Image: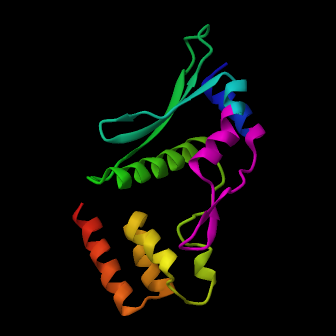
Amino acid sequence: MSVYKKLFEAKKEIGKITKDSKNPFFKSNYLSLNGLIEAVEDVLVKHELLLLQPIEDGKVITMIVNSDAENISVATSVSSSIQLPNIQDPQKLGSAITYYRRYTLQSLLGLQAEDDDGNSATKHVKQKLDAKGLAFLIDRGTIKQIEECFKLRDVQPIQKVELDKKLAELKSN
């Protein structure tokens, strides 16, 4: 059976994925990489599909391989990849890798996913940026998240200074 037919059958079994984690900055839920893999891996294995996510040439690659070795004439794998940003800080690079692994897998499987970077936050009245949200942005925030913060949150002048520094750092990488 082709990899596409197997993926079609697997996708019917996977269905909707439940969000299992909280984003403290936006006070929203999202699906973690571990939650996503847990939700799909058993179904993929059942259909003799192997999930691989190597990092090669500065890209996160997500591949699903047809492990049915008896039928070599059919397509044997499908893949999705995304270029990693040039980040020198290992912790931030690790966060980017995790984020990209999650999104390439969701994309490859065509799973329903709500944007966890701010869609739910835009429905709320502008709130103050709290210490926890500021710490999250300084530690792991993306350019998009910080820019959204300025639109969605009441940012105090001292917080703005810190976030402007972080933005400059991210944009220089």
- Quadrant of the rendering where the C terminus is positioned: bottom left
In the rendered view, does 33 fall on the left or right side of 169?
right
**Residue 110: in sight, yes or no?**
no
Residue 60 is a magenta residue: no
- The part of the chain drawn in magenta is 12-41
Q: Quadrant of residue 26?
A: bottom right
Query: Image point 61% across, 73% down: which residue?
Result: 27
Rendered position, 167 above or below 85: below
Query: Image point 63% across, 55% down: which residue?
Result: 31
Q: How many marks?
A: 0
Task: Estimate the x, y position of residue 119 in percent, counting from the top left.
Answer: 58, 72
- Quadrant of the rendering where the N terminus is positioned: top right
Query: Image point 61% across, 41% down: which residue?
Result: 109
Query: Image point 58% across, 80% down: which residue?
Result: 122
Task: Estimate the x, y position of residue 83 in percent, counting from the top left.
Answer: 35, 47
In the rendered view, does 70 fall on the left or right side of 143?
right
Task: Estimate the x, y position of residue 71 in percent, counting from the top left.
Answer: 60, 10
Q: Nearer the viewer, residue 32 or 60?
A: 32
